[in-house]
Amino acid sequence: MRFSAFTASTPDWTPSEAVRILATQGYDGVEWRVTDQDDAPTPGFWAGNRATWPLTGLEALLPSIAAITRDAGLEISGIGGYARCFERDDVARLIAATAALQAGRVRVTMPMLRTGHYRDLFAGARKDLAWACSLAADQGVTILIELHHETIASSASAAMRLVEDLDPASVGVIHDLGNLIIEGHEDHRAAFELLGPYLQHVHVKNVAWHPSPPSGDGVVTWQPDWSPLREGQADVAAYLRLLREVGYDGWVTLEDFSTAVPLEERTADNLAYLRSLVTG
């Protein structure tokens, strides 16, 4: 396995700082966040993230992205795009950028739930993916679908229904350990076996559910929150063991959105922890 970090989870660093620190810590690669984002008074994961490349004007930035990554001695494990599958112009731009960077794979996001009737959203996404895969195949790029809560592809089973008739050389699935704690969890071994050749990328983070104070009638509701890798509800050690047992040897990307530990300490400790699990 090779380890990278998704820059959504490194908001305090500029791109140059991110690759320098990650390389020094021993990471093999970086997964670049690419999206137009809102400004924020302080850097945050989703707004004001300093390690994010904008989609607007992306083409002119490609030489800088390539040089910064190469000069740090890292590979690009993938492009973390945010274009929905039906935003075809943006999807095409991300595919072309991924090809130019020789990054190999790019995330294309699925429709959000409750933005239409589920069957209609699903049918539309199938058509959009067939179109995107044809375009990606011509440019030597693989489209990645992330298992993500509150989308039409929160589980491995749902993702498999989206991709099962498409060439795994041009489309794959990101199995995301933390997202599945929120929604979509299935037995991991069964999910890996179900996905087969479509299991092409892995995201690792952790989540814990916490109760809210009881309401006036005594009802307690529960909410998920990002957690340090060792403290959430997902068994990270068992997860990596199962990945190895099914023969997965691709990228494992860390995207820890917890904040209990300072960023540089967090990225270093996370990598050391995961490496200890696969070499111990």
Image (cartoon, rainbow, N blue to C red):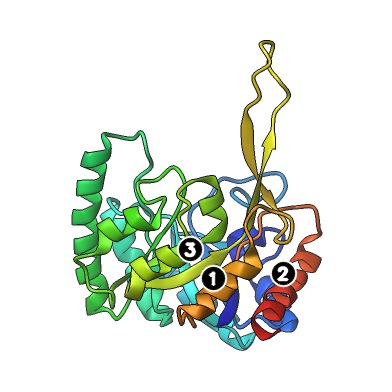
Under mark 2, the amino acid is Asn
Tell me what residue is drawn at x 28 percent, y 34 percent.
116
Under mark 3, the amino acid is His
Q: Earlier in the sequence, mark 2 or mark 3?
A: 3
**Residue behind mark 1:** 31
Q: Earlier in the sequence, mark 3 or mark 1?
A: 1
Q: Residues within 10 Å of mark 1 (few under 14, many from 20)?
A: many
Give the left or right position of residue 164, taking residue 267 as reference.
left
Q: Residues within 10 Å of mark 3 (few under 14, many from 20)?
A: some
Instruction: State the image coordinates of residue 66 (x, y, percent, origin top left).
Output: 51, 81
Tell me what residue is drawn at x 62 percent, y 57 percent.
234
Instruction: State the image coordinates of residue 5 (x, y, percent, origin top left).
Output: 61, 70
Instruction: State the image coordinates of residue 77 (x, y, percent, origin top left).
Output: 50, 77
The span from disc 2 to disc 3 (Cα, nearest Å) is: 21 Å
- Name the mark nearer the viewer: 2 or 3: 3
**Closest to the observer: 89 or 247?**
247
Quarter holding the N terminus?
Answer: bottom right
Q: Residues within 10 Å of mark 2 (few under 14, many from 20)?
A: many
Under mark 1, the amino acid is Glu
Tell me what residue is drawn at x 71 percent, y 20 percent.
214
